[in-house]
Amino acid sequence: MKRNRQAVLAAILAIPCAAGAQGLVSQRSISVDAAQEAATAALAQCRKAGHQVSVTVLDRFARTRVILNDDGANPHSFEHSLRKAYTALTYRTPSGEYGKRAVANPTGIGALHLDRITTAAGGLPIRAGKEVVGSIGVSGSPGVPGSPPGSGGDADAACAQAGIDHVGSKLK
């Protein structure tokens, strides 16, 4: 009988500990070192193509980890790289894909009025497996000749992907 009481008492005392543990979450996020490496690799890729761009890397909590503005990058490219990274992070999809969905579903276009959201390509989520741990946005690549200004999103996205590829093995 005494052992039964001790077992019941131990079980009761363990309940608050288990409940308290459920009040916390642990989430992985890109480190500042990996963010720096990704941004530097993205910038280098764009430089190889002759593009002067801005690169922004956000962590999973939308905190800015790194901003790089290349010499000669347009002043607005800084803000646009941030918007691309933010869109990719919050929608967990490439910013250009979000743009295609917004056009295809006009009822969701209201989200474009949210701060930092854009439909332009060049922002990509950074994943560790299936988990989004950050995002990268690149802005400033020129479009193809004859295209409107700011239409270099595909080139921006390629540079962003180069940055992700560079740090991919560290995000496992």
Image (tube, rainbow, N blue to C red):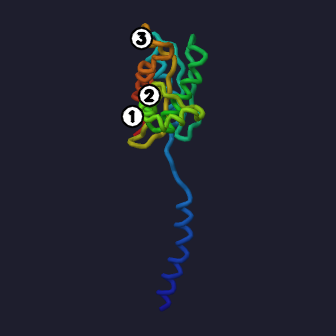
The residue type indicated by label 2 comes to Gly
1 or 2: tag closer to the N-terminus: 2
Q: Residues within 10 Å of mark 2 (few under 14, many from 20)?
A: many
Percent from the top left, x then y, of residue 54?
Answer: 54, 20
Which numbered circle lies on residue 169? 1
Judging by the rendered image, the residue that carries numbered circle 2 is 96
Callout 1: SS = helix
The residue type indicated by label 1 comes to Ser
Percent from the top left, x then y, of residue 88?
Answer: 48, 33
Which numbered circle lies on residue 159? none
Viewer-proximal residue among 45 and 152: 152
Count of marks overlaid on the render: 3
Q: Residue furthest front?
A: 107
Q: Quadrant of residue 127?
A: top left
- 160 left or right of 54 in image: left
Residue found 46% across the figure and 33% down from its top? 102
Residue found 51% across the figure and 83% down from its top? 6
Is the C terminus in the top left, top right, bottom left or bottom right quadrant?
A: top left
